[in-house]
Image: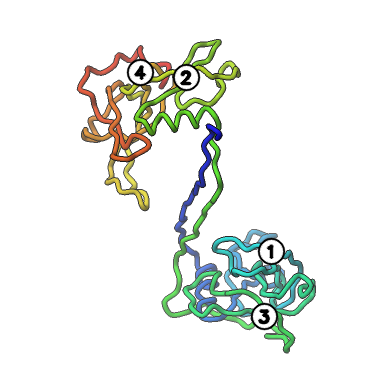
C-alpha cells in the first residue's frame, strides 16, 4: 500500500455578473424563443451579439432578429459527455451560422453518430422545455431538412417584459489530487492533531507545509520535524465579504502564522478575540473541531506578544 494520498478535489466558483443592454436582450430573447443579433458597422449581423464592433471598436446597439435555422460550419464529435454538458448521450459540438447571421454560434448537435454530421448540414434550434434567460434555453441543435428561416434579419427593439439583467456563470474543476510523499505525511499528521514539516539538510530551515524539497537550496528534504502547536501571527487581513456556503460571520481575520520551530508561515483563521484586536506578534494555538482533519481556527494563548525580531524574517 502506498503512503501517498489521493482524493477527488473540486474547485468551484460561481461568478455573478450583470448584463448590459445587448446581452440582456439576447438572453431574454432566448427565454422567449427569439434569437437576436447585432448589426456591425459594415452591415453584417453578429450572433451571439457583442456590445462593440470587433473591427472599429464602436458601440453597437442595432438589434435584429435572425432565424432559428442555420448551417453547420465546423464540428467535433464528443463520445463521452461530462457533467452538466448539454446532452447526456454522445453528441457533436458544432459552430452554427444561423440564417441571417454572419458569425457562428457554438452549441451541441443531437445526432446518432459522427457519420450523421457534416459541414454544411442544415440544423435548427431545439428549445428547452423550461427557459430562464440563459444560453441553456437552447437545449441543442437538431438536423433539419425544411425551408430556411428569415431571409433577412428583422429589426427588433430588444424590449421584453421582465428582462434578464444578470446571470450566474458557474466555473468548476473536478480532478484527482495526489499531494505527494511530503504533503501526504503532513496531512496524515494533521489527522492526529500534529503538525510536521521537513528540514533542509543544507540550510537547516524547516518548511511547513513540507514541499519535498527546499525552495531556497533546491535540495530534497526527508527529515521530518514536528512543530508548534503554538505560533505567532506574522501578518493578517480582515475579511468583510461573506463567502457563499461558508458558515463564518464577517468580519473575521485570516492570518499568516509562524508555528514554533517552523521557518515558513502557514495561514489560518483567528477567532476567540475581537477582529480589531488581532495584531502582529499575537501568540496563538490551534483549535480542533471534533473529527476534523485540520485546525478549525487559532485562538490567543494569553502569552505576551512575540518580539518583532523573532518573526520579522517570516513576514
Compare marks 4 and 3 and give the one earlier in the sequence.
3
Q: What is the spatial separation of the Cα atoms under label 2 and label 4, in whole angstroms?
A: 15 Å
Question: Which part of the image, by quadrant, shows the C terminus?
Answer: top left
- Which sits in the foreground, 235 or 19? 235
Label 2 or label 4, whichever lies nearer to me, is: 2
**How busy is the neighbourhood of tag 4: few (under 14 within 10 Å), some, or many (20 plus)?**
some
Circle 2 sits on which residue? 224
Q: Secondary structure at mark 2?
A: strand
Q: Mark 1 highlights which residue? A: 78
Q: Is 135 displayed left or right of 206 in the figure?
A: right
Residue pictured at 44% horizontal, 67% vertical = 165
Crowd class of label 2 (few under 14; some 14 to 19; many from 20; radius 10 Å): some
Q: Closer to the N terminus: mark 2 or mark 3?
A: 3
**Distance (Cα) linking label 2 and label 3:** 63 Å
Question: Pointer 3: what residue?
Answer: 124
Q: Establish if 3 lies above or below 159.
A: above
SS for callout 1: strand
Q: Residue at x 77, y 75 (%)?
A: 116
Amino acid at each position: 500500500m502506498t503512503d501517498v494520498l489521493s482524493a477527488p478535489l473540486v474547485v468551484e466558483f460561481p461568478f455573478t455578473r450583470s448584463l448590459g443592454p445587448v446581452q440582456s436582450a439576447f438572453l431574454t430573447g432566448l427565454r422567449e424563443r427569439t434569437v437576436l443579433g447585432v448589426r456591425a458597422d459594415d452591415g453584417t449581423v453578429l450572433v451571439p451579439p457583442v456590445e462593440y464592433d470587433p473591427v472599429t471598436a464602436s458601440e453597437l446597439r442595432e438589434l435584429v432578429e435572425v432565424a432559428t435555422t442555420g448551417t453547420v460550419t465546423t464540428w467535433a464529435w464528443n463520445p463521452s459527455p461530462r457533467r452538466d454538458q448539454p446532452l447526456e448521450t454522445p453528441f457533436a459540438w458544432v459552430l452554427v451560422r444561423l440564417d441571417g447571421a454572419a458569425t457562428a454560434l457554438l452549441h451541441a448537435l443531437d445526432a446518432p453518430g459522427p457519420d450523421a454530421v457534416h459541414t454544411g448540414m442544415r440544423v435548427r434550434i431545439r428549445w428547452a422545455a423550461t427557459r430562464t434567460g440563459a444560453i441553456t434555453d437552447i437545449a441543442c441543435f437538431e438536423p433539419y431538412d425544411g425551408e430556411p428561416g428569415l431571409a433577412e434579419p428583422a429589426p427588433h427593439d430588444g424590449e421584453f417584459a421582465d428582462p434578464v439583467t444578470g446571470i450566474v456563470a458557474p466555473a468548476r474543476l473536478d480532478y484527482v489530487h495526489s499531494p505527494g510523499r511530503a504533503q501526504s505525511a503532513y496531512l496524515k499528521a494533521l489527522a492526529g492533531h500534529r503538525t510536521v514539516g521537513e528540514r533542509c539538510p543544507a540550510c537547516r530551515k524547516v518548511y511547513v507545509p513540507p514541499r519535498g524539497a527546499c525552495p531556497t537550496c533546491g535540495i530534497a528534504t526527508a527529515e521530518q520535524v514536528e512543530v508548534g502547536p503554538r505560533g505567532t501571527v506574522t501578518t493578517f487581513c480582515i475579511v468583510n465579504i461573506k463567502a457563499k456556503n461558508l458558515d463564518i460571520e464577517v468580519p473575521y481575520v485570516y492570518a499568516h502564522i509562524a508555528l514554533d520551530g517552523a521557518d515558513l508561515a502557514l495561514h489560518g483563521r483567528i477567532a476567540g478575540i475581537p477582529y480589531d484586536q488581532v495584531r502582529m506578534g499575537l501568540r496563538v494555538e490551534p483549535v480542533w473541531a471534533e473529527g476534523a482533519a485540520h485546525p478549525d481556527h487559532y485562538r490567543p494563548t494569553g502569552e505576551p506578544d512575540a518580539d518583532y525580531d523573532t518573526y520579522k524574517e517570516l513576514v
